Amino acid sequence: MDFVVAQTRANMEYFGSKFPWSATKGLKYPIIENIEWTDGFWTGLLWLCYEYTGDEAFRQRAEQNIDSFLHRVENRIELDHHDLGFLYSPSCVAGYKLVGSEKGKRAGILAADKLMERYNQRDGFIQAWGAVGELAFMGYGVSQGGSIPPNHMGPGIVGAIMAITAGVNVETALALSIPFAVGFQFVLTATYTFATTLTGAATRALEKKNFRMFRLAANLTVWVFFIVGCLIGLAAALSASGLEAVINLIPAWLSTGLTVAGKMLPAVGFAMILNVMAKKELIPFVLLGYVLVSYLGLGTMAVAITATAVALIVFFNQNKGGVAAEDEEVVFEDGI
């Protein structure tokens, strides 16, 4: 812990009143303004060091950061996402709990108010973002609290095997593979649970200043997921003949019903995501995509390339202001 405190003290002088970016460049953290979703972690680390050492230097710098967080929430700077808890709990709420910071209290309450704007009262959830996989799973978004949605990798892997080996159409393969979405989520949850046991080993190694063991324990999670991925791929490949036999047992009337259901799933998923994310500014792009597919008959790749071209045109036109590149404000996208 003393090593962590020493490293934090050195970085505190390096960053000053600003913040580290969420990732390194050339093994160094770029210095940025308070605009990222990870900035609360840095201030939280300062509070932890103050709690451990009682050094007023950590407290003073953390309270300076609270001023920045209060300014950010009052002016709503880069807060249109679901990571407000990451931002304001370890920084401002922690400051209020530790030293009774009134600014921290106010910032935390304003952040909670901002987060409530993302609450969907009808369906009872806080909007995060849509998935980037199949349309059928876009409406699920990501997990909220204890809710674990089905995982789109199940249909992505098993559905592809069904379509290739058994010759079923895409719609039927999608409908048949939905149970595997639930199964994959159970596997991933079990993997995450096992990976949490490595945290204790990493902490003990760090306390003993055994940095080699710490690096091993900290990075072993990557290998755990790699092994699980290989096992899933192997199991999916070996089950191809079994899946084909099961599909052959399905009567024609049920196969027809599954095909109809499979055609409806992408529409339902897309409707779910539009229900919480649609904005009037995006309606022209939705209409453009509809025309490209329904009237011009373009395929997925053609629509994707067209959408990319439109996005680039919009992006470049937004940046036409005659401002020098070095004077432009750098904005980083949020996202875990």
Image: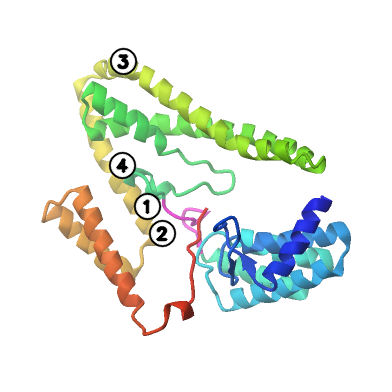
Q: Which residue is label 4 attached to?
A: 265
**What separation in Å lies between label 3 and label 4 (alpha carbons)?**
26 Å
Residue type highlighted by circle 4: Leu
Q: Is residue 125 magenta?
A: yes
Element type at mark 3: helix
Q: Which residue is label 3 attached to?
A: 241
Q: Which residue is label 2 attached to?
A: 276
**What separation in Å lies between label 2 and label 4 (alpha carbons)?**
17 Å
User: For the point 56% across and 37% down, which residue is it?
Assistant: 222
Classify residue 249 as left or right of residue 17.
left
Element type at mark 1: helix
Say whether disc 3 or disc 4 marks the residue closer to the N-terminus: 3
Q: Which residue is label 1 attached to?
A: 272
Image quadrant where residue 51 sits: bottom right
Say whether disc 1 or disc 4 marks the residue closer to the N-terminus: 4
Mark 2 and mark 1 residues within 8 Å of each other at the beta carbon: yes
